[in-house]
């Protein structure tokens, strides 16, 4: 299995509070991705990174920011959490010379 | 990314081959066909991908039609642990998931 972990695995927070989710990899892969998964929507791409300090938006990026200061870590921040951001968040990684992505175990976030 | 169409759900008897179809009639020349699956609430798992030739690995086989407008994922001997949602994706680099096919393997 690809060395990819996510923390925390579960979090409950209140509306309006900032939240940061961490994705950590030990594979030295170039690409990292954040998705959210909601019933009836499959997985939707939030942001992705193609290198240290290089990031770009996905299809549902509003309300989210990301940072990647080193290869192994990709952080997803909800500056002011809203109930619509209650979801399961998955991180994925991909090597530069391959097309397949490997996913982490997910973080279940509940915003009350 | 090309749009893909998959059946919402399928059943397969344990030990039999599971054949999961996918239509991607608008696929462009540089887009690959990928298959992933997601077991219950786990993270999606990569299965296989191909461009135009048929592919086989330890998990499955991928059959792509000559015109590349459709493909079939084959699990040769389905087990109960293959019960999952299977996603077919046609993409160059970004991977865009639809809602997939829910495969139920029946004892």
Image (cartoon, helix red, strand yellow):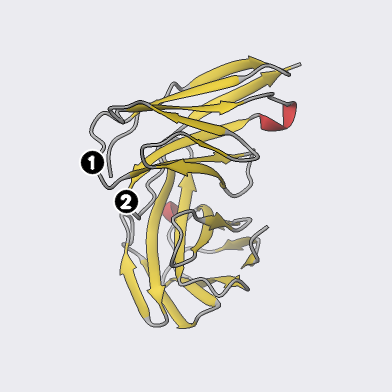
Q: Where is residue B85 in the image (x, y as percent from the top left)?
A: 55, 33
Tell me whether marks 1 and 2 sit on the same chain: yes
Residue A54 falls in image quadrant: bottom left
Count neighbours of disc 2 (C-alpha within 10 A) and say few if under 14, some if 14 to 19, many if 20 or more: some
Chain ID of residue with mark 1: B
Q: Are marks 1 and 2 in contact (CB under 8 Å)?
A: yes
Residue B26 falls in image quadrant: top left
Q: Earlier in the sequence, mark 1 or mark 2?
A: 1
Which quadrant of the rendered structure holds the N terminus of chain B?
A: top left
Q: Which of B10 and B20 is in front in this view?
A: B20
Is residue B12 in sight in this rendering? yes
User: Which residue is most to the bottom?
Assistant: A69
Position of residue A17 relative to residue B82, above or below, is below
**SS at mark 1?**
loop
- At x 60%, y 40%, the residue is B57
Position of residue B12 relative to residue A13, above or below, is above
**SS at mark 2?**
loop
Q: Where is residue B67 in the image (x, y as percent from the top left)?
A: 27, 27
Find disc 2 in the rendering and name its residue.
B92
Find disc 1 in the rendering and name its residue.
B28
- At x 73%, y 26%, the residue is B79
Count neighbours of disc 1 (C-alpha within 10 A) and say few if under 14, some if 14 to 19, many if 20 or more: some
Chain ID of residue with mark 2: B
Q: Which of B86 and B52 is in front in this view?
A: B52
Is residue A112 in sight in this rendering? no
- At x 36%, y 37%, the residue is B52
Q: Nearer the viewer, residue A62 or B26?
A: B26
User: Which residue is most to the right?
Assistant: B107
């Amino acid at each position: 299995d690809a060395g990819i972990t996510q923390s925390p695995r579960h979090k409950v927070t209140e509306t309006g509070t900032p939240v940061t989710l961490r994705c950590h990899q030990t594979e030295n892969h170039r690409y990292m991705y954040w998705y959210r998964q909601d019933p009836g929507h499959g997985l939707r791409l939030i942001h992705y990174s193609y290198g240290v300090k290089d990031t770009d938006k996905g299809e549902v990026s509003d309300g989210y920011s990301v940072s990647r200061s080193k290869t192994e870590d990709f952080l997803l921040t909800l500056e002011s959490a809203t109930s619509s951001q209650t979801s399961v968040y998955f991180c994925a990684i991909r090597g530069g010379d391959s097309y397949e992505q490997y996913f982490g175990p997910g973080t279940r976030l509940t915003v009350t | 990314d090309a749009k893909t169409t998959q059946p919402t759900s399928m059943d397969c008897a344990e030990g039999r081959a599971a054949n999961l179809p996918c239509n991607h009639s608008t696929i462009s020349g540089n887009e690959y066909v990928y298959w992933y699956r997601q077991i219950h609430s786990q993270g999606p798992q990569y299965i296989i991908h191909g461009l135009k030739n048929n592919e086989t690995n330890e998990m499955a086989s991928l059959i792509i039609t000559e015109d590349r407008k459709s493909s079939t994922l084959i699990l040769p001997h389905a087990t109960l642990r293959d019960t999952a949602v299977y996603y077919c994706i046609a993409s160059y680099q970004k991977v865009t998931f639809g809602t997939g096919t829910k495969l139920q393997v029946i004892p």
